[in-house]
């Protein structure tokens, strides 16, 4: 076997590879199983007594027929062909519990790793599952490993290779990487998102803006300064193109600024990251709405390419009796007013309608802007709510009452205490000279989705009334695309701009679109990290369109020196528990918009990072048949 191997890093954002969970048919003759390797695999357990202590300790015994004792037995007998045609050796987490439990001290993981080195390439995972799950292609294992070594600035640089907004992502990312983390099979996933935030908190202040290539003489207009637009502007400017960021509002950030409350994303974090991008030489044009102060045709005439990232910044409206009352607000606009510093003062009991993240943020913001109590009414059941589970839990901690499986029937309006509907000028129950909201009639929702998973709510005849003084409707977001000519070449699909999903190009030459306003592949959620990935794809495609190579990757996080990885696990490694993020006390949160999550200190972050299983290095070991060296 070779002695050392060097990890190579791919730079394509959102790179995908072979499905590591597939079971392709493999010809045993195609596996790398010469006789000497079979002997080597058998050597550590040649006298294994098959006591079963290893399989009893293993956290995945029985998962997809995995049983380490049986694998050891097969190797001991020299009959491994049936193992080499399956993914069983790759199910092993290499957590080390088996070796800790073995009464004879055998190096059981050596068996697993040797089998992996003998398997066909088709069965070798293309990359660590956390990285594969990241839409932006972020190299999580690499920056986590650097944090474990207390190399925080290097970790931050690695993150910046894939995305220009690590401080944002470290706070509000949906972190699909954690859903795929192999450590989950052992106990809990690594806090990948929180470690990203830690790297930003530690190193961002001293990080110099990346260098830019020589000016190409090409110009690009990026319309919208949300996550997709900022990401595209960052990568296009790095490639040497002149970039103008066109924004309808006074400040850059899009929904990052005007849709996410400060208790999740502090303004200073957003300002820092946007400032870093503008400092690269990106021009910013505020208060310029497409279709009002400027037209698409004008942008085309003045620039070599145009990218539309206008987002979904208006509330989805629904016809509902009483919804036109002044005490009925719309969620997206309410959050924007709060974030913009408008003196929004709610009154009394507030009912929020919706089950998504916007609705949860509206409910929590309502507690901070005058509401005495907040009830969140959701069509979905508690388990079906589309809001992130951790955000729903946060709402419950702060005192929001959740009423699942009910929808709005009508809003009840009172004139002098009587439910007679809204009439301008009537004396209201509050003595204000106008009618007031007294409650909401709810209708029981029996199901939200049809058999194919499509949104198709069904209701029973059962109703009930919910007393409240104000209602905020937060039932979704929509995109204002009225600036487009219905007969023009830029076409819509399902209410979104139709684009090529690999290049983000529209049918109009030189015009691209990305983010929440653009069509997405089926099943792709409208998350911030997906918008960032789309912005980077668009930047690469635009660079190609302008004559470049389309490569947006830049290695800026190379480490100094090398560390050999042999896979040895320290005593107690498997038992290391996930560290909980320290947060403000729930009772004190509603007093203002201070950030709720407090962040890790250095000791905590290093501890959490050391829980990583180093899946990427395990892959290198298998491919090279020996210890891995990460550089």
Image: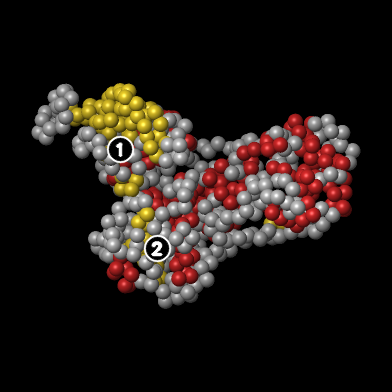
Per the model, the C-alpha gap separating discs 1 and 2 is: 33 Å
Image quadrant containing the N terminus = bottom right
Mark 1 or 2, closer to the camera: 2
Q: Which mark is residue 473?
A: 1
x, y (%) of residue 574?
69, 37
Please say if 540 is above or below 442.
below
Q: Which mark is residue 448?
A: none
Image quadrant containing the C terminus = bottom right
**Residue 450 occupies quadrant:** top left
Query: Which residue in the structure is indicated by mark 2?
Result: 506
Within-10-Å neighbours for mark 2: few <14, some 14–19, many 20+:
many
**Mark 2: which secondary structure?**
loop
> What residue lies at 75% left-to-right and 53% top-to-bottom?
27
> What residue lies at 16% left-to-right and 29% top-to-bottom?
421
Please say if 364 is above or below 403.
below
- Considering every residue shown, the one lying at the far bottom of the view is 217
Q: Which of 445/215 is in front? A: 445
């Amino acid at each position: 076997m070779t002695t050392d191997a060097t990890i190579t890093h791919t730079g394509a954002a959102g790179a995908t590879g072979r499905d590591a969970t597939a079971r392709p048919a493999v010809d045993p003759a195609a596996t790398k199983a010469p006789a000497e390797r079979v002997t080597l695999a058998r050597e550590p357990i040649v006298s294994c007594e098959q006591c079963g202590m290893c399989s009893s300790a293993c956290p995945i015994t029985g998962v997809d027929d995995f049983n380490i004792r049986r694998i050891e037995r097969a190797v001991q007998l020299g009959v491994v062909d049936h193992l080499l045609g399956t993914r069983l050796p790759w199910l092993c987490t290499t957590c080390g519990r088996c070796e800790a439990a073995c009464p004879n001290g055998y190096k059981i993981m050596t068996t697993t790793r040797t089998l992996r080195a003998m398997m066909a390439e088709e069965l070798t995972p293309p990359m660590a599952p956390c990285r594969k799950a990241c839409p932006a292609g972020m190299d999580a294992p690499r920056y986590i490993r650097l944090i474990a070594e207390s190399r925080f600035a290097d970790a931050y640089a690695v993150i910046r290779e894939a995305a220009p907004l690590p401080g944002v992502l470290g706070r509000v990312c949906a972190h699909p990487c954690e859903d795929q983390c192999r450590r989950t099979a052992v106990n809990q996933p690594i806090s990948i998102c929180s470690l990203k935030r830690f790297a930003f908190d530690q190193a961002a202040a001293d990080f110099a803006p990346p260098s830019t290539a020589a000016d190409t003489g090409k110009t690009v207009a990026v319309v919208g300064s949300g996550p997709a637009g900022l990401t595209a502007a960052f990568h296009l400017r790095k490639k040497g193109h002149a970039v103008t960021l066109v924004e309808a509002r006074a400040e850059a950030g899009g929904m990052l600024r005007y849709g996410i409350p400060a208790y999740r994303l502090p303004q200073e974090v957003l300002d820092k990251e946007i400032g870093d991008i503008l400092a690269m030489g990106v021009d910013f044009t505020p208060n310029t709405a497409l279709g009002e102060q400027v037209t698409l045709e004008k942008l085309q005439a003045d620039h070599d390419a145009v990218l539309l990232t206008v987002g979904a910044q208006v509330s989805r409206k629904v016809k509902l009796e009483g919804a036109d009352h002044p005490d009925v607000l719309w969620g997206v606009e309410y959050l924007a007013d709060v974030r913009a510093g408008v003196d929004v003062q709610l009154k009394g009991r507030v009912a929020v309608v919706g089950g998504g993240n916007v609705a949860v943020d509206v409910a929590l913001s309502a507690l901070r802007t005058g509401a005495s109590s907040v009830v969140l009414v959701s069509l979905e059941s508690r388990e079906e709510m589309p809001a992130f589970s951790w955000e729903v839990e946060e709402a419950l901690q702060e005192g929001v009452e959740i009423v699942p499986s009910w929808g709005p029937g009508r809003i009840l309006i009172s004139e002098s205490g009587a439910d007679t509907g809204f009439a301008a000028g009537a004396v209201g129950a509050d003595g204000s000279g106008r009618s007031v909201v007294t409650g909401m009639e709810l209708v029981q929702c029996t199901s939200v989705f049809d058999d194919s998973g499509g949104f198709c709510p069904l209701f029973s005849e059962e109703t009930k009334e919910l007393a409240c003084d104000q209602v905020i409707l937060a039932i979704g977001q929509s995109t204002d695309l009225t600036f487009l000519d219905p007969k023009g070449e830029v076409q819509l699909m399902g209410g979104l701009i139709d684009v090529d999903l690999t290049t983000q190009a529209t049918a109009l030459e030189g015009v691209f679109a990305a983010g929440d306003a653009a069509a997405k592949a089926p099943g792709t959620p409208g998350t911030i990290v997906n918008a960032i990935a789309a912005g980077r794809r668009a930047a690469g495609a635009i660079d190609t369109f302008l004559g470049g190579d389309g490569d947006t990757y830049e290695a800026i996080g190379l480490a100094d020196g090398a560390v050999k990885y042999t896979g040895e696990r320290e005593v107690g490694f498997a038992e290391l528990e996930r560290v909980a993020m320290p947060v403000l006390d729930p009772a004190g949160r509603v007093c203002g918009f201070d950030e709720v999550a407090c962040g890790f200190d250095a000791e905590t972050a290093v501890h959490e990072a050391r829980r990583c299983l180093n899946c990427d290095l395990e892959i290198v070991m298998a491919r090279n048949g020996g210890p891995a060296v990460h550089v």
